[in-house]
């Protein structure tokens, strides 16, 4: 069982999102990490899609403090990411296992991929949401 989680957007420490408090209550920070994928600006929030080419997403790697709480803890995050939808609706995200790299060393981790297409969304070429938003919001 994998108890690690890779986050790239609102759950990163630099966003100061209220959900980050939840994350740090049940998970502990392991370090900066990258995952093969592409980021896009959806207007209101960043989205990530897997890719086979050499593009990487910068983020943070966390590990669950108590493996016995995995089911409950991940269900709360699934709810935050909009995976729990009514019958007939399509979730905005899907949770999948990926290979995350910390210092070049691979490890399995969960990630929330966008569950729709990226048409008409600008790519975040840096692969780093925080850097992208700092540049975008400069006066």
Image: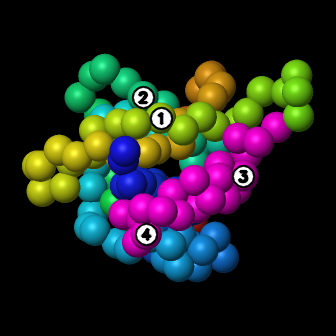
The image quadrant where one finds the C terminus is: bottom right
Kindly state the secondary structure of the residue where label 2 is placed.
loop
Residue behind mark 4? 66
Between the residue at mark 1 and the residue at mark 2, the CA separation in whole angstroms equals 10 Å
Mark 4 or 3: in front is 4
N-term-proximal mark, 1 vs 2: 2
Residue behind mark 2? 50
Between the residue at mark 2 and the residue at mark 3, the CA separation in whole angstroms equals 21 Å
Kindly state the secondary structure of the residue where label 3 is placed.
helix
Cβ–Cβ under 8 Å for marks 1 and 2: yes
Q: Residue at x 54, y 38 (%)?
A: 95
Kindly state the secondary structure of the residue where label 1 is placed.
strand
Position in image of residue 138 (x %, y %): 52, 69
Location of residue 99 by image quarter: top left
Label 4: few (<14), some (14–19) or many (≥20) C-alpha neighbours in 10 Å? few
Cβ–Cβ under 8 Å for marks 1 and 3: no
Between the residue at mark 4 and the residue at mark 3, the CA separation in whole angstroms equals 20 Å
Say which mark, if any, is on residue 96: 1
Mark 2 or 3: in front is 3
Say which mark, if any, is on residue 60: none
Residue with the most extreme front position: 68
Q: Which residues are magenta?
A: 63-85
In the foreground, 119 or 100: 100
């Amino acid at each position: 069982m994998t108890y690690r989680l890779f986050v790239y957007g609102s759950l990163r420490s630099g966003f100061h999102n209220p959900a980050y408090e939840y994350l740090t209550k049940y998970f502990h920070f392991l370090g900066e990490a990258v995952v093969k994928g592409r980021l896009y600006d959806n207007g209101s929030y960043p989205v990530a899609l897997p890719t086979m080419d050499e593009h990487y997403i910068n983020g943070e790697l966390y590990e669950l403090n108590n493996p016995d709480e995995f089911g409950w803890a991940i269900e709360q995050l699934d709810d935050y990411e909009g995976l729990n939808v009514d019958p007939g609706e399509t979730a905005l995200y899907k949770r999948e296992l990926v290979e995350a790299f910390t210092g070049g060393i691979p490890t399995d981790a969960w990630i929330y991929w966008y569950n729709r297409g990226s048409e008409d969304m600008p790519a975040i070429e840096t692969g780093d949401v925080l850097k992208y938003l700092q540049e975008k919001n400069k006066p």
